[in-house]
Amino acid sequence: MIAVGWLVLALPFVAAVAGFGLRHTARRPAAVLAVSATGVATVLSIVAASATATRGPVPSANGVGLASFGALQVHAGLRLDGLAAVVAVAVCVVALLVQVYSVAYLRGDDTYPRYAAEVSLFTAAMLDVALAADLIQLLVGWEVMGICSYLLIGHYRDLPEARPAAVKAFLVTRVGDVGFLLGVLTLGAGVGSFDIGTVIARAGSLPTTTLVTACLLLLLGVVGKSAQFPLHTWLPDAMAGPTPISALIHAATMVVAGIYVVARLYPAFRVDAVPLAVLGVVAAITMLLGALAALGQDDLKRVLAWSTVSQIAYLSGALAVGAPVAAIFHLLTHAAFKALLFLAAGCVLHATGEVLMSRMGGLRRRLPLTFWTMTLGLAALVGLPPAAGFFSKDAVLGGAYEAARGHGGGPAWVGWLVLVAGLLTVVLTAAYATRLWLRTFFGPVAEPAPGQQRWTVREPCWIMTGPLVVLAAPTVLLGFAGLRPQWLPAWLGEPGVSVRPVAGMALVSLGLSAAGIAWVVLTWRRAPAADPVPAVPLLARAFYLDDVQDLLVVRPYRLLARIVTAADSGLVDGAVEGTGAGAGVLSGRLSRLQSGNVQAYATGVLAAAVVLALAAVLL
Amino acid sequence: MHLALPVVLAALLFGIGVYGVLARRNAVLVLMAVELMLNAVNINLVAFDVWLRDTVHAGQSLTLFVIALAAAEVGIGLAIVLQVYRLRTTVAIDDLDQLAEPPQEAKR
């Protein structure tokens, strides 16, 4: 079974390496290569996952030794348990659907082979993160994901905002990654091993200060990669990339990698209360921030991006209140419905050529399949039964309630904080999801922008709508996996945990959702063409946090860079160039003696002879 | 005869030669000035040879050498002057400054 795991990891990687070697005209081989490799990897991951479901974690042999630093050994191995398997399956399925979808979405794009190879490389990196048995091996996958994200955000080179967005995403996540690297090293050096199993087993014996420091440093990386406050600013801008990339990297997989790592190392995180309390505060802020910002966006993809920020905060909130099973449950359902929403948004973009919701409207009849699948996705996002989001979000809120009553293991105030923020976010989520739904699919058909001709809006071909239909199935059905403790919780190795909805919490959250929906619907019915949510610049600009970041980080950094550049060109280059220029000026002066007048030379010779003779006589 | 007379004569001749070499514009006259300097040296050689009563007359024999070399030198020198005149139609020394460093702007 370990061999199957290795194959799952290796297939996308081989496809990526081979894909980078293809010429840019080789569209068809690139598509076949990427789709088939990801498809086989998906099948194998399901095989491996079913093995972990029936027989428990696959015992792994000692991995391949990669390097040794004195007493510390770095291995490459596989840790194939339920947690790794479910995440690997989710990654493979979404990656496969995105690869299929991209074949049609990037039809006219002459850089498609490179794109497909980058997606394959990303898939391999994410699978490496999911399956790694060694923290350094995990770190490698983590970093490769970062570079793939950078490359893919900047895929549309002609788009003016793509390049800055890619650089921003890279730099902001890099800030977190520095912390992540230091955290891995602190943990590894403290425990004496990078093996995840050993780290989990021995984390309790570490000095508290070391452990808390390591966990907080790891959390910095998590906050960066998973777009949590205050390092969330890169994710909305990352929407400049192709929409399938937003679905794969910036909704379903990479951004939840941080959550996955915390869940993976959860025994280390729950030893002390501080790291999880910090995570809880971050989650509460991010939840509300993301949901409020999503309410104020006009760009369809940016609504979904802010929604992702807010939903990932649910995951970190669940981790903070001691409910990792609920976090992974919501991670899986979120991967399904958010990938569905992004791919559906891609269909809308593809069909209308428009990203602003104010220029859409009335698309319900023209894009029926997109409309229905997106409705299912939004229902899951809001948490309406029987869609999957209802069950998983309820599990998160239930976990927070348990923690607030003191049963979660952490401090009760973290539970209250996450619970209150989570319930408020439920209202806001319902509001922004309804707003998106109404603005895009209902109301009058918007007039085209001046100077543009009207598009003939048609449903995209089956290659693009097929993945929507496939994703609609888990969007609706995945929630039932948590109904019994023997199903998902037992698979994740926590058979005693229940993630089924509790009647009281379900009623409260449904009531709040209904309130949010009713608010938007009632406002909208008064003026169907207008925005049901008043345009508040504070929300549209996401509380001006980008400007704060610009003021506090970017400008001082630019100033510093200018000083360094000036010092470099002024002092260092100046010294070198000054030497040359000075020699030039001096030799220019001297060369005036070279007058070409022989008699002047002879006079010089005579004068020198006289001086020498006088010197010889007198001295 | 006192040594002062030939030595003063030689010094005068040499001075005139130096002046000619440094100041005359005509290349032929410069060559002649060089001859004057050589002859000033010759006078010194002969005078000191006599005054020192040299038995092997090294001074006089050296003078013969110098005369022969001066003849050869003038032959070559005049040939060069002739060629210069053919090429440049002038033998004015301060016009013949093709080897001068051309005037330059300040460059890096």
Image (cartoon, rainbow, N blue to C red):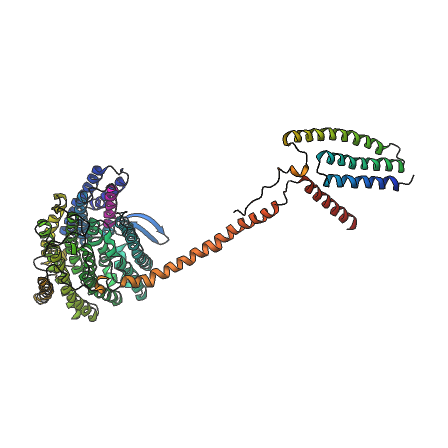
Classified by dominant secondary structure, the portion drawn in magenta counts as: helix
Left or right? Give the position of A161 relative to B72: left
> Depth check: A285 or A305 in front?
A305
> Depth check: A416 or A87 in front?
A416
- The relative height of residue A136 versus residue A600 in the rendered view (above or below) is below
**The quarter of the displayed image where residue A567 is located:** bottom left
Q: Where is residue A199 in the image (x, y as percent from the top left)?
A: 27, 58
What residue span does the magenta drawing correspond to? A108-127
The residue sitting at the right extreme is: B1
The residue sitting at the front extreme is: B89
**The quarter of the displayed image where residue A540 is located:** bottom left
Q: Where is residue A284 in the image (x, y as percent from the top left)?
A: 21, 66
- The relative height of residue A536 versus residue A377 in the rendered view (above or below) is below
> Depth check: A329 or A314 in front?
A314
- The relative height of residue A255 versus residue A536 in the rendered view (above or below) is above
Can residue A464 be seen here? yes
Left or right? Give the position of A478 relative to B65: left
Can residue A230 be seen here? no
Left or right? Give the position of A49 relative to B23: left
- The relative height of residue A32 versus residue A353 in the rendered view (above or below) is above
Q: How many labels does the image show?
A: 0
Q: Position of residue A65 (x, y in %)?
A: 31, 48
Magenta residue check for A120: yes
Magenta residue check for A258: no
Q: Where is residue A121 in the image (x, y as percent from the top left)?
A: 25, 46
**The quarter of the displayed image where residue A303 is located:** bottom left
